[in-house]
Image (tube, rainbow, N blue to C red):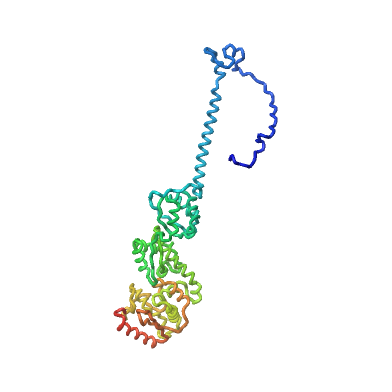
Amino acid sequence: MSEHDERGPIPGLDDTAERPAVRDEPEYEYQRDETDVDQAEYDEAGWDDDGARPRGGSRRAERRGSRVPGCLAVLVALAVVAVVVVVGLKAFSSVKDKLDGLGGSGGDYSGQTAHDSVTFEVKPGDTAAAIGRNLKSDGVVKSVDAFISAANENPDAAGIQVGYYQLQKEMRAEDALAVLVDPKNIVKTTVAIPEGLRVTDVVDVLAKKTGFKKAAFEKALKDPSIGLPAYAKGNPEGYLFPATYAFGPKDQPVDMIKKMVARWQQAAKENDLEAQSAALGYTPAQMMTIASLVQAEGRGSDMPKIARVIYNRLEGPGNKQGTDGRLQIDATVNYALNRKGVATVTTDELKTESPYNTYLNAGLPPGPIEAPGDDAIQAATHPAKGDWYYYVTVNLKTGETKFAETYDEFLQYRQELKSYCENESAGAC
């Protein structure tokens, strides 16, 4: 209790209160032990009245008057107290360490000396206390309290972003926080995957940007944990969503592929892929194939019209407009030939034997031919209204595309493209 404690005296310990009477103790009858020394023996031994023993006195009397048993009792008592103190200190130290790990006090580092670097991760949902505990566990800050105090004094602490940060061991909590509040300090590898890439192209980009070998990504693509939908049947073509990704320093190829598939899942949910597919009479797998065709053939506002052309050809009865249910899309022939960036195909190439050749085979190809983005998925699930059966991109530079309802109209637009290729494209066709 502090000397300033004003709680008042504890009952029974007030010096001013009247003390209770001493209890009457029962009488005790002394029983003489055979080892006791009687007065005659005492006198005979020559003990003085003050208890001093002269030389030559009785050894028996000396043994009787020894204080050794009492000293042993005191020593034993002191040893017990010492053990209790040591055990108590150890227990206190253990409890303190545990409290420090949960946010207890523990001071702060000076931060004056450079130490080994630490790659630290801020995870989704981490609170200031959780970040502080993880920093202490990694040896970055000395105590959780020091970090929380620094966070309470810094208004930017609430904006710490998820990601990896490069820190040092034994930093001042204030200095560690200064690194975490600045998004520029997030350690990441940024990889942009544009729309319309095939899986093989995506792997090339990832290998170039991340430093991992292509074989590592090809292996990751076969990992069941990447999250492909069941209807993809293990084929990732079309499901590696085009977007800009920030990969952390600890991300492995399988983690990167997982993030790309997860981003596709987000797009599928936002576009209500399954419900819209059912409403149009198609499976989600077929819808993804259609979206990939739209991505390969269209741009911007033309995408919903191209989607409508595809549906009209798939659903048109018999030989309506001379299509026989064949999509006749050049991009599918290029996919069958394993090439990209070719605007038109030759007459001989149109005869390529492949289930992906939509000039030879009616209906949809077996699966997506590239990765569609949000616009293409949106167009496939929400096609425009119209009776078009043909479209021709008449200007490859601007992407201008014209839509036709009849074959004769299509031939006119085709001639327009031929003229463009001969006069303006400089060999682009």
Q: Is residue 234 above or below residue 56?
A: below
Name of the residue lying farthest toward the front: 4
Report the quarter where the N terminus lies.
top right
Above or below residue 370? Residue 39 is above
Q: Where is residue 355 in the image (x, y as percent from the top left)?
A: 38, 75
Front-lying residue, 164 or 128: 128
Residue 391 against residue 130 in the figure, above or below: below
Left or right position of 21 against 66: right
Identify the residue at horizontal 56%, vertical 25% (top origin): 70
Q: Where is residue 401 in the image (x, y as percent from the top left)?
A: 39, 81
Quarter of the image holding residue 59?
top right
Q: Is residue 46 visible?
A: yes
Of residue 163 and residue 421, the one placed in the foreground of this image is 163
Quadrant that contains the C terminus? bottom left
Rendered residue at 36%/64% (across/down): 206
Q: Residue at x 46, y 80 (%)?
A: 384
Residue 354 on image: x %, y % = 36, 75
Residue at the far top: name it.
44
Q: Where residue 358 appears, x then y in whole percent? A: 38, 78
Q: Is residue 235 visible?
A: no
